[in-house]
Image (spheres, grey):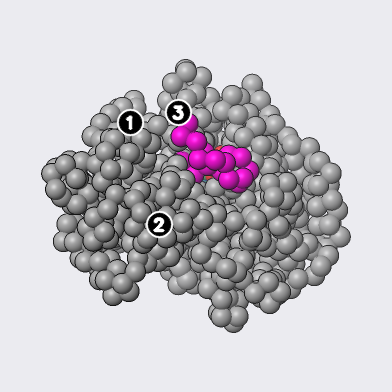
């Protein structure tokens, strides 16, 4: 909840393309505080409305609150220091802390609950000791602390304010990160507007502090291709007048898996458009394009460090473990600090998922999803889910029937503009031998286009999304799907915007409950769950192969040249558009790779290469865990294995296929049939112990020996000739 509020607040801050707007209170999102908390200082005519981070006695965090401060300080009236008085009031209201010093912010952001009153007292003693030792007020220390807190929160430093000395500097319009140092106040016992030289100096220092951040060297903001959001915390922590952005196109990123041309184009078009907008907003952007031949992201960063000698490098959490390591190594080589900032794009921080996971024996998505609905108050009716059910999956498994998909509105296309056309030309020139074609490229590549894509989906396809979520049809690659994954993963679109738009469509009776719940489940549930699993278990996760599959990936995955109609359709549209919907990925190509025992590393590399939306944090657990059941049953408690029955029921693929979906063995038998039974037999030991596999394993046991022998022989023959 707190992240949500901070993100919302931050978004409103960044609305003007990162230009620091004057901190007008009307920009502040109104969060009504039923229990105003009082704080701050003797004779201090605080009339402004400030936001405080409230940290409650039970250790839980609540959203930043809007708090009305009263005129005059409550503290002086009863002879207590304002700090003590503030804390007394806070405690009475069930709050440990009213003002948030940077240490507290650090604690909070590290996911540690404050230790309560005792810890607070210790911190006060520590501050006091610092003051006493130096004999002077450590203004810079404090200003630095305030900035430090802002950095950690990913807020532009100039919005953070040092309130020491009642300097009248800007109030942070989002979150007050300030110190009151009750020790100093008691020592001077002077009104803060008085003539005390210490206070005067502090006041002067504070006045300039927001304009002159502590660091004297510029910083480099590394902006990766999947970090294109306005709320990128690295941008928020930097200063356009001093710091520079580094964006790097490299052939290595497109080649470390042989990326589909549309995937490369999607990233580069997103990056080039974003760079334009950032320049318009006053940023200095060092943009290395393909023609400059930068070998890798790390090389680009090392080179930039050598040229600009930055104080440190800021980056939002990368979407891939490999990239994070490469950036760490580059900064390590040059002995420059790398600050990796939590990405507020996601509902949950990595550490929050980890602490949820630490309380679980197994990670069940359904449990996670319900907890997320409650925590973020999404599609809830008080404490109950809207519609009184958490899950409408049963209503979301429809197929089209013989008439096929009728009355579906095609998705909006975004025709390439001049920037994108140049990208397409560059991609064709640099990567002529890569899979896929660029002819149909029409993905949203800017935040504005992504918003239109969301509107288009909600208005035209969401109403039928649920019902036909799992259905497939020849020549129909998109059906009622949202096609938003690439825009989401490049952070052109905020997941909250998707969830809220769907909720609103339901509340206005424009989309049925099951469709809306189904869509929210994918974004708030699956997407966040998958990301949590990735960061929880990397890097070992990528090496898992619990079913010991080791067959090479068949070549038809790269050219769709196969007689299996379902595979040819799913792969063919993938090559044409860089897109297949979830059930095609899971129950056609994924299912085939699972049944055929293809080496997970090769399958994962294919999925990472071939889809426009592929970023490893989302691709890997979906492929390794969900599709291949190779991750020791973390993502799924049973394999998504199916015979031709399922494919026939959910599509019309079998109609024109050269194989017979109703034959298990013999001439023309569908490979999905004999491979399915062969797969169960191969892994009898593992699945025999799995309660969720009782039904298929019983059917396997009922099969007579001769039929089983035919199945095994035909499967072996087929696999040998793949
Ligand atoms: C083997 C395999 C590999 C996959 N690889 C990727 C990948 O590289 N990138 C990717 O974004 N998705 C991946 N997915 C998940 C899912 O297939 C795609 O998100 C979805 O097909 C994208 O199309 P859409 O935007 O039209 O989604 P819709 O069907 O309209 O769903 C709405 C949104 O929900 C989210 N979503 C749905 N299912 C999942 C899921 N299982 N995990 C995470 N988010 C989900 C996506 O953001 C998607 O845009 C993979 C699934 C499988 C089985
Ligand atoms: S018959 Fe088998 S191979 Fe052919 S489309 Fe159906 S499931 Fe696929």
| Towards the viewer: 526 or 717 | 526
Q: Residue at x 51, y 30 (%)?
A: 501
What is the crowding at mark 2: few (fewer than 14 residues within 10 Å), some, or many (at least 20)? some
Label 2 sits on a secondary structure element that is helix
Determine whether 48 is above or below 717 in the image: above
Quadrant in the picture for residue 657: top right
Report the residue at 47% width, 17% height from top: 509
Q: On the image, numbered disc 1 is attached to which residue?
A: 32
Whether disc 1's CB lies below 8 Å from ligand 1 is answered: no
- Point out the tag, 2 or 3, that comes first from the N-terminus: 2
* Residue found at x 62% / y 66%: 218
**Residue 350 in sight here:** no
Quarter where residue 187 is shown: bottom left
Image quarter hosting the N terminus: top left
- Residue bearing the label numbered 2: 200
Left or right placement of residue 464 versus residue 610 in this view: left
Percent of width and height locating residue 283: 68, 53
Write down the quadrant of residue 112 in the picture: bottom left
Magenta residues, start to end: 9-26
Residue placed farthest to the top in the image? 509
Quick one: SS at disc 1?
A: loop
Q: Is residue 479 magenta?
A: no
Badge 3 density bin: few <14, some 14–19, many ≥20, Cα 10 Å: many
Crowd class of label 1 (few under 14; some 14 to 19; many from 20; radius 10 Å): few
**Whether residue 141 is situated above or below residue 707 in the rendered picture:** below
Mark pair 2, 1: CA separation: 35 Å
Q: Are marks 2 and 1 in contact (CB under 8 Å)?
A: no
The x, y position of residue 288, in whole percent, is: 76, 64
Residue in the foreground of this view, choosing between 346 and 316: 316
Report the label total.
3
Closer to the camera, 638 or 635? Answer: 635
């Amino acid at each position: 909840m707190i992240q949500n509020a901070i993100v919302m607040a931050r978004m409103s801050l960044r609305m003007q393309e990162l230009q620091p707007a004057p901190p007008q209170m009307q920009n502040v999102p109104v969060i009504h505080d039923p229990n105003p908390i009082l704080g701050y200082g003797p004779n201090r005519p605080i009339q402004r409305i400030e936001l405080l981070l409230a940290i409650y006695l039970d250790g839980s965090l609540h959203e930043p609150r809007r708090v009305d401060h009263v005129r005059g300080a409550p503290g002086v009236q009863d002879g207590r220091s304002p700090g003590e008085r503030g804390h007394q009031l806070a405690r009475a209201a069930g709050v440990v802390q009213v003002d948030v010093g940077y240490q507290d912010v650090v604690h909070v952001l590290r996911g540690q609950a404050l230790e309560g009153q005792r810890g607070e007292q210790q911190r006060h003693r520590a501050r006091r000791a610092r003051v006493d030792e130096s004999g002077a007020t450590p203004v810079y220390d404090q200003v630095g602390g305030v900035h430090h807190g802002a950095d950690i929160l990913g807020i532009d430093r100039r919005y953070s304010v040092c309130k020491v000395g009642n300097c009248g500097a800007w109030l942070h319009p989002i979150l007050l990160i300030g110190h009151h140092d009750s020790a100093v106040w008691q020592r001077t016992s002077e009104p803060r507007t008085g003539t005390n030289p210490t206070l005067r100096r502090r006041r002067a220092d504070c006045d300039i502090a927001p304009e002159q951040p502590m660091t004297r060297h510029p910083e480099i903001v590394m902006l990766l291709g999947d970090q294109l959001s306005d709320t990128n915390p690295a941008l928020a922590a930097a200063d356009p007048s001093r710091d520079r952005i580094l964006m790097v196109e490299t052939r290595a990123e497109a080649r470390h898996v042989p990326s589909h041309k549309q995937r490369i184009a999607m990233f580069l078009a997103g990056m080039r458009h974003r760079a334009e907008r950032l320049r318009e907003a006053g940023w200095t952007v060092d943009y290395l394009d393909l023609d400059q031949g930068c070998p890798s992201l790390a090389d680009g960063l090392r080179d930039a460090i050598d040229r600009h000698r930055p104080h440190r490098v800021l980056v939002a959490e990368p979407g891939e473990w490999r990239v994070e390591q490469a950036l760490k190594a580059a900064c390590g080589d040059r002995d420059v600090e790398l600050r990796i900032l939590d990405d507020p794009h996601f509902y949950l921080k990595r550490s929050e998922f980890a602490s949820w996971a630490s309380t679980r024996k197994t990670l069940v998505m359904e449990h996670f999803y319900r907890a997320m609905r409650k925590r973020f108050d999404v599609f809830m009716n008080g404490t109950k889910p809207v519609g009184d059910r958490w899950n409408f999956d049963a209503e979301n498994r429809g197929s089209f029937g013989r008439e096929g998909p009728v009355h579906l509105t095609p998705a909006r296309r975004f025709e390439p503009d001049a920037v994108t056309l140049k990208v397409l030309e560059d991609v064709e020139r640099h990567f002529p031998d890569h899979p896929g074609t660029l002819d149909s490229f029409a993905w949203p590549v800017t935040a504005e286009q992504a918003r239109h894509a969301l509107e288009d989906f909600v208005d035209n396809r969401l109403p039928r999304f649920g019902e036909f979520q799992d259905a497939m049809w020849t020549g129909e690659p998109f059906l009622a799907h949202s096609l938003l994954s690439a825009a989401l993963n490049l952070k052109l679109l905020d997941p909250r915007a998707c969830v809220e738009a769907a909720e609103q469509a339901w509340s206005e009776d424009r989309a049925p409950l099951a469709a809306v719940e189904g869509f929210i489940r994918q974004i708030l549930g699956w997407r966040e769950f998958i990301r949590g699993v990735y960061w929880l278990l990397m890097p070992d996760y990528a090496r898992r192969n619990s079913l010991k599959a080791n067959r090479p990936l068949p070549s038809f995955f790269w050219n769709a040249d196969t007689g299996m109609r379902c595979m040819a359709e799913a792969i063919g549209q993938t090559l044409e558009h860089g897109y297949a919907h979830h059930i095609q990925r899971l129950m056609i190509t994924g299912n085939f790779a699972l049944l055929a025992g293809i080496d997970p590393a090769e399958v994962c590399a294919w999925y990472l290469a071939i889809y426009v939306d592929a970023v490893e944090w989302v691709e890997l657990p979906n492929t390794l865990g969900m599709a291949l059941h190779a991750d020791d049953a973390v993502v799924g408690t049973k394999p998504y294995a199916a015979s031709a029955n399922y494919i026939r029921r959910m599509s019309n693929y079998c109609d024109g296929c050269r194989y017979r979906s109703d034959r298990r063995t013999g001439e023309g038998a569908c490979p999905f049939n004999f491979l399915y039974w062969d797969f169960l037999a191969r892994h009898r030991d593992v699945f025999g112990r799995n309660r969720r596999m009782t039904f298929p394993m019983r059917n396997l046991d009922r099969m007579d020996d001769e039929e089983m022998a035919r199945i095994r022989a035909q499967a072996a023959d087929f696999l040998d000739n793949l």
